[in-house]
Image: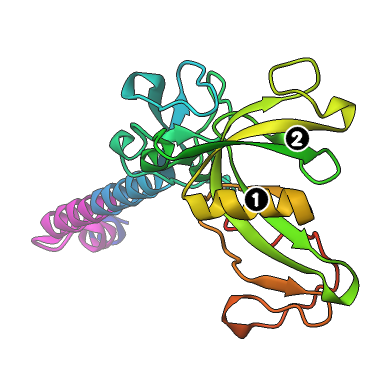
Amino acid sequence: MQSFLSHAGAKGKLAPGTFKKRIVRTTIGYLLLAVSIATSLMTLAVSLRHSQITVFQVSTPVASGEKISLNQIHQIKISSSNRQISSQFATAGDLAQMVTNQPLVNGQLIEVSDLSDAARSNDQGMEMNVPLASSKAPLDQIYPGDYIELISTIGSGSSATSRVVAAAAKVLGVFKSGSAFGQMGQNGANVLLTLNNPVEAIAIAQAETAGSLVAVRVAGSAVPAFQGTFSLGNPTAAGGVQSSSQTLGVQPPLVK
């Protein structure tokens, strides 16, 4: 019996240095675990940082056609999980002194299409009052500060042609029945415009006398994407690109 216990005790005794080796292995294990946790936290932090984007919202209401100032802009960070929202401006300075294309309400996120370059907002140029029929213009969606393109159609049948006669004309006022210049009744309005040059004024006057005018509201850009002449039998865009449209009075494609 004593011999058996002596043998068991000898068998259970640790070899020299075994305990120290176990401590070293345990310490290394904890260090590797700590490094793994730290790496995971850093990855999470980077992921969270990249999933947030900077956007700008209106802090006070801004009317259409007004220059927006820095004290009307509030910068916030939001999650980019919503793919429909993107960071469209790098800094608040990119927005300052730009002109609103439409009224902006308090708290509204500002998008590129909401603003136009302030250089286009100057009041220099020729002012002209243009009567427009409601069937030829989106009068309920046109406000002071907006920009429109005017397309004239002259002639009829297969000889009718349409062309852009005024590109990026700034709307100064929309006068319906009962207001100043309001002689169009319930079927239209007189729109006061700032034109870019005398050629546009002459072309509009000619269209009023010998043809008709169609107004197209520019959405997000005052640069006309289509300049050319429609011919009913052979519609051709600028640069000789053939158009599939066979109908006069359709609005040309616009930059959005």
Q: Quadrant of residue 6?
A: bottom left
Q: Which mark is residue 162?
A: none
Left or right of 79, for residue 176 = right
State the residue position of label 2: 139
Q: Quadrant of residue 119?
A: top left
Of 249 and 76, the residue lying toward us: 249
Point out the frontmost of discs 2 and 1: 1
Name the residue type under label 2: Leu
How many numbered circles are shown? Answer: 2
Name the residue type under label 1: Ile
Left or right of 159, for residue 166 = left
Residue, x 75% and y 35% (percent of image)?
A: 139
Q: Looking at the figure, which quarter contains the N terminus? A: bottom left
On the image, the x and y values in percent for residue 197 come to 46, 50
Residue 214 can be seen in this image: no
Q: Which contiguous range is marked in magenta?
A: 7-33
On the image, the x and y values in percent for residue 244 come to 79, 78
- Mark 1 Cα shell of 10 Å, populated few (<14), some (14-19), many (≥20): many
Badge 2 element = helix
State the residue position of label 1: 204
Q: Quadrant of residue 10?
A: bottom left
Of 149 and 46, the residue lying toward us: 149
Badge 1 element = helix
On the image, the x and y values in percent for residue 233 come to 83, 81
